[in-house]
Amino acid sequence: MITVTEAIATPGALKRLADEGVSIWLDDLSRKRIVSGGLADLVASGTAVGVTTNPSIFQAAIGSGEGYEEQLTDLAVRDVTVDEAVRMMTTADVRAAADVLRPVYDATDGRDGRVSIEVDPRLAHDTAATVAEAKQLAWLVDRPGVMIKIPATRAGLPAITEVVGLGISVNVTLIFSLERYREVMDAYLAGLEKARERGVDLSTVHSVASFFVSRVDSEIDKRLTALGTDEALALRGRAALANARLAYQSYEEVFGSARWLALAGERANRQRPLWASTGVKDPAYKDTLYVDELVAPGTVNTMPEATLNAVADHGEITGDTVTGGYAQAHADLAAVERLGISYDEVVRQLEDEGVAKFEAAWQELLDAVATSLRNKGADAR
């Protein structure tokens, strides 16, 4: 298999993907990746033009301890709280990554060159706390390329509006349903309108809406397999793509509206759809499925390194694979519903599980850092 490093010298599927108007962001970050120059290599080659993080990514990176020993010792000597320690380490990584990506940020006027960092997932159902945390994170990172990730929970929607209204760029995460996606776009437009009232230069505000893909297939496929009929089994692997394609249809509608055009006239930026959770969970499916089949202009695809490598090696980028598939997408989701699988129930479950998974990962990270602080504090004394 061609690795991303080898693909730098032999442009292929990744370049074709970029040529189709898809921004490739890396769904991973660690201090080792920054210090080793690995991230800089990806950026310099044009392979990746942005980075996303989440609590699970930081739990894996910081939980390993690799590259964080000196900072952990310093934090232990200062006797900081575990929450402060985690924020100091995560914002340091995001700040350093934003510096690596700054040339991309400058070259694209802020469209790419972005690094996302998430608000504490324990605040997902608290609007005021989410807004306060977003402001604090933007201040701590102190780089124009930072995007603050806010979950698309019911409480997250007004937080999105307020944070965007302050001129802070936002990555809205954990979007699973078409209805919630429309609410997210509405929250973004309302935020831009607030920003305009406050005299913010709208051209400086950017946003992406992270629409999750593979988890939809994982849950619906499980239910289709349980039914076991030929009709049910024939629908496996189709719901996630259908859901994402219809999300893009909604995006085209909202960002073609009179409300949007009024903002666009004041140099506002569209909130781009970002395909998240694009690593294939079912080994029966092609490992580049959620990249090859979700090519559309003005989108972002954030990939874990394994998926990035797979696309570089054998991705099949054949042009726009989204906008011509709306009728089939509607038919596929309707067929799933006819079998008694409730779309609304599935997406609600996935949102709840998504928040819970990030909360659990964050707690694991806090526990690991707390242990390290205790041990290093004892050693220092």
Image (spheres, grey):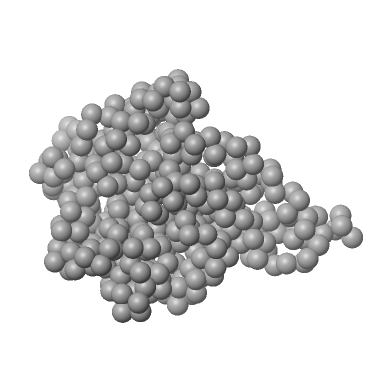
Q: Is residue 331 left or right of residue 13?
A: left
Front residue of 224 and 301: 301
Q: Is residue 122 above or below residue 129?
A: above
* Image quadrant occupied by the C terminus: bottom right
Along the line of sight, the residue nearer the viewer: 24 or 106? 106
**Left/right of residue 32 with respect to residue 132 in the rendered view:** right
Q: Residue at x 29, y 51 (%)?
A: 273
Q: Is residue 277 at all visible to an observer of this figure? A: no
The residue under the point 57% across, 36% down is: 38
Residue 64 appears left or right of 105: right
- Give percent across and percent down for residue 128: 45, 77
Place residue 370 in its image quadrant: bottom right
The residue lying toward the viewer, choosing from 330 and 145, is 145
Residue at the right extreme?
Answer: 381
Q: What residue lies at 74% left-to-right and 61% top-to-bottom?
A: 75
Q: Is residue 128 above or below residue 91?
A: below
